[in-house]
Amino acid sequence: MLKATKIFVSISIFAILLFGIYVIAPAAEITEVELDNGLKILTIEDHSVPLAAVRVCYHVGIKNECPGVTGITSMCEMIMQEGTKKFKKGELSKIVQAGGGVSSSYTDWDVTHFYTKIPLDMLDTVLLLEADRMANVFITPEKLLLAKDIVRKRRLEAVESSLYGYINEEFINLAYGAHPYGHNIYGWPGDIDRINQDDVKEHLKKYFQPANALLIIAGAINPDSAIARAGELFGNINSIPLTDRRPISDPVQIGERRSTIEGDVGIPVVLIGYHIPPVTHPDNPALRLISNILSTGVSSRIYQRMVNDEKSGLYSAGGLIEPEGPGLIYSYTIFNYDSPIDVGEEHMLGEIDRLTNEYVSEAELERARNRAVVDFYKGSRTLDFRTAVVGTYGLITGDAHFTKKRVKALYSITPDDIKKTARKYLHKSNRIIVSISPPVVDESVEPGGDYE
């Protein structure tokens, strides 16, 4: 049985961060300071477990890549993992693992993350390692070649070798005609080949520096001591002034966009999406509930229709893409191999249209709201998720408490808000549909050939 993660639940692991995150622990004590070099430090005190977490977030992602250098942020991420003159390649991971900790990194739409979770007594060591990485990363031809190779392999795994990787890529590329979000985090193969050492050096200098970063220290910590030590280690790292971020917009879509992919897949898929505004827009809470009503869980309308009632679908789900810039709301269905894909699409659209024409019941709205609140508290239990949310939204909204406020806003949403918001966004001229199915076989053509 295929799992939901095989389709467009995420572009990569960073989907957990942008497709539906809500959480910072409601009871967590958050302290924020800013150093003279522009580095923002945020602490989250939580003594529920004797652990500490360090997350360094740089406000750079897909959005900051222009045509010709797509994938460069992921390449910079890889180079940041390649060590410094003081700590050679792999030493950071070895030190962390020897102490019983774990470390990871990833690039998403707007933010690049470096994350470590360790026993409390290793906090000072990790802060020292991260400060060294921020200050002393350097690039060589060998590092560049290795970074390119890793990015190519990631693209191969996520797109080219994935059963449904191309539908994810096609959907995003079709949705964002001019916006940088239209390419994936791994970039286009031709761009990866052509990016040179000077390109990467300039990208590192501009974005991977204190004035463009947020350092989060969380766990069973003493905030005052943690901030003081971070100030000692990071405070003298040179930074450069940030230039104003120019707003990026996509032309308004004026008609349905559609793409059909013939792929070597056993079962067809239909993915339907609509443009929505950035995550900070006032309509976002209502859109969250709309997504829950339509596509989240086995009680959602499209799942009930396609899997339980029509029995044409194996699985159905959906969500929100909620970046700093324009986002998307989407639903998809994985169909049975013998189900007519055009009929299935019609049924999915029927459920979407019904939401724009009829009021949801108070009970259904309450169920959608309760699911969101449960997700809020469920996610808030881990340092990984909590620091990821605070890091992402702390940078793209400027408010570390943003998600907490957004969950509160869910309680003010009414059935009338749901209908009005659905009508505003879920209409044909704002729609993107991508489907993938096995090639159509022309039975009039006999296999083989005439070799007489």
Image: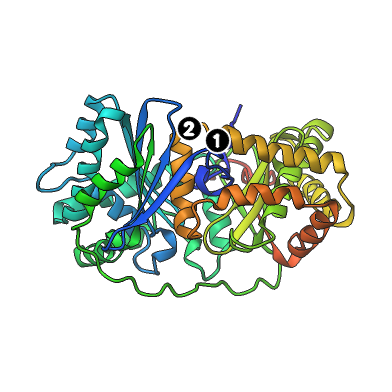
Please indicate whether residue 380 sits to the left or right of residue 328 in the image. left
Q: Answer with the quarter of the image where residue 117 lies.
A: top left
The residue singled out by tag 2 in the image is: 382
Looking at numbered disc 2 in the image, what kind of residue is underneath it?
A: Thr
Query: Looking at the picture, how far across and down is residue 48, in whole percent?
Result: 46, 27
Disc 2 vs disc 1: Cβ atoms closer than 8 Å? yes
Nearer-the-camera pick, 288 or 37 = 37
Residue sitting at the far left:
85
**Of residues 133 and 52, the one drawn nearer to the viewer in this rendering:** 52
Q: Mark 2 falls on what kind of element?
A: loop
Looking at the image, what colour scheme do you see?
rainbow
Q: Give how far across and how far down residue 385 sits, in percent.
A: 48, 38
**61 w.r.t. 2: above or below:** below
Residue name at image x 52 percent, y 71 percent: 178
Which residue is found at the position 79% from the left and 51% from the top? 352
The 10 Å Cα crowd at callout 1, few under 14, some 14 to 19, many 20 or more, is some
351 w.r.t. 126: above or below:
below
- The spot of residue 125 in percent (x, y) is 21, 36
Q: Which residue is mark 1?
A: 379
